[in-house]
Amino acid sequence: MKLGFHLGYWGSGPIPGAQEAVLEAERLGFDSVWSAEAYGSDAFTPLAWAGAATSRIKLGTNIVQMSARTPTATAMSALTMDHLSGGRFVLGLGASGPQVVEGWYGQPYPKPLARTREYVEIVRKVLAREEPVTIDGQFFQLPLKGGTGLGKPLKPTVHPLRADLPVYLAAEGPKNVALAAEICDGWLPLFFSPKSDGFYRAALEEGFARPGARRSLADFEVAASVPVIVHDDVEEAASRIKPALALYIGGMGAKTVNFHHDVFARLGYADVADKVQELYLAGRKEEAVKAIPTSLVEDTSLIGPAEKVREELPAWEKTVVTTLLLRGDAGSLARAAKALS
């Protein structure tokens, strides 16, 4: 199982010590480093900054929000990053949720799976550069219909370094996971647990079985964001993760549409997820954090003394996950890598 480093997205400003952590990840032999975006910092710029200081480590977006850019604009950034990094770039895409898509980007959210299928199709056409890019889709038309009538089919002026640049999809629901297996080269799960491996394995196999699927489980990447905190006190380690869990379960989505909440409900924590969401949306954030049991953290993380982490690692190695994406500063990455080695 490979290790990756997830920078995440900025809070109120740049992430302190980010570049030092990236350099440490490369020194430690990590396979990849990943960036993210929500509605503040973007995903491409910090990754380019990291790429300029490194020479070997792969550079991935986890994730680029599709509603933030047209498919051709995303493909332009991807082929540019791939050239600048010498073929180290991985394009990770995600649909996000209706609050961000409609509230921040002003784009419609309905039918995200069908929209994703068209989006990825266009990105691949740009990267292939075999002919001018055209599509008469439900969501995208190239050239645009109903405009001036002067739109012209084009292909990128830049010759892509890799026409088969890998594209991964962030997904949490079974239909979206199956779509990732069908049209992409990898899947980016969030809040994965070995206990949910059978559920996700079935969804992936459904996608692999579809006509025209690009991959099989044997050559498909699954890079899961998994908190790893090596600490003698399990409760102290869990307390560092619970605030983020409360945010995602309770606040990253509307009460009626929160995909992160649904992940934990499927994992057997439906009552907990409902309670956390109720408290968080009522503004009682500290109570929401306290409502999360340590068992929930342990199901989706590797925390505690090094011996405990090593004992639990085989359960993860038996799953579909191929890469563990860790977070933290340079020191915590070194401790985690030692415990996992």
Image (cartoon, rainbow, N blue to C red):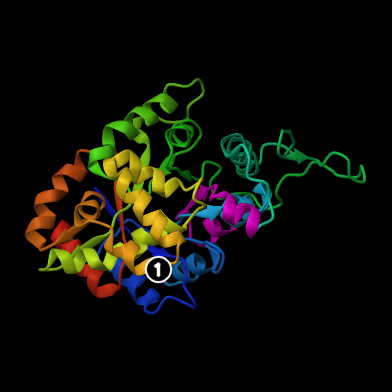
**Which one is in front, 216 or 68?**
68
Q: Which residues are magenta?
A: 79-104
Q: In the image, 114: left or right of 241?
A: right
**Which one is in front, 213 or 160?**
213
- Percent x, y of residue 136: 75, 32
- Percent x, y of residue 306: 10, 62
**Which one is in front, 338 or 313?**
313
- Percent x, y of residue 329: 30, 73
In the rendered image, residue 144 lying in the magenta stretch gets the answer no
> Eyeballing the image, is 182 above or below 143?
above
Residue assigned mark 1: 54
Q: Is residue 79 visible?
A: no
Q: In the image, 63: left or right of 290?
A: right
- Percent x, y of residue 6: 37, 61
Location of residue 178 by image quarter: top left
Specify few, some or many for label 1: CA neighbours under 10 Å numbering under 14, 14-19, or 20 or more. Answer: some
Q: Quadrant of the C terminus?
A: bottom left
Q: In percent of the image, x 49 and y 33: which residue is there? A: 179
Location of residue 187 by image quarter: top left
Q: In the image, 149: left or right of 17?
A: right
> Eyeballing the image, is 4 above or below 262?
below
In the rendered image, residue 95 lying in the magenta stretch gets the answer yes
Q: Is residue 101 visible?
A: yes
Q: In percent of the image, x 32 and y 32: which residue is there? A: 199
Q: Amino acid at mark 1?
A: Thr
**Which one is in front, 244 or 310?**
244
Q: How many marks?
A: 1
The secondary element bearing badge 1 is classed as loop
Q: In the image, 147: left or right of 288?
A: right
> Eyeballing the image, is 185 above or below 9?
above
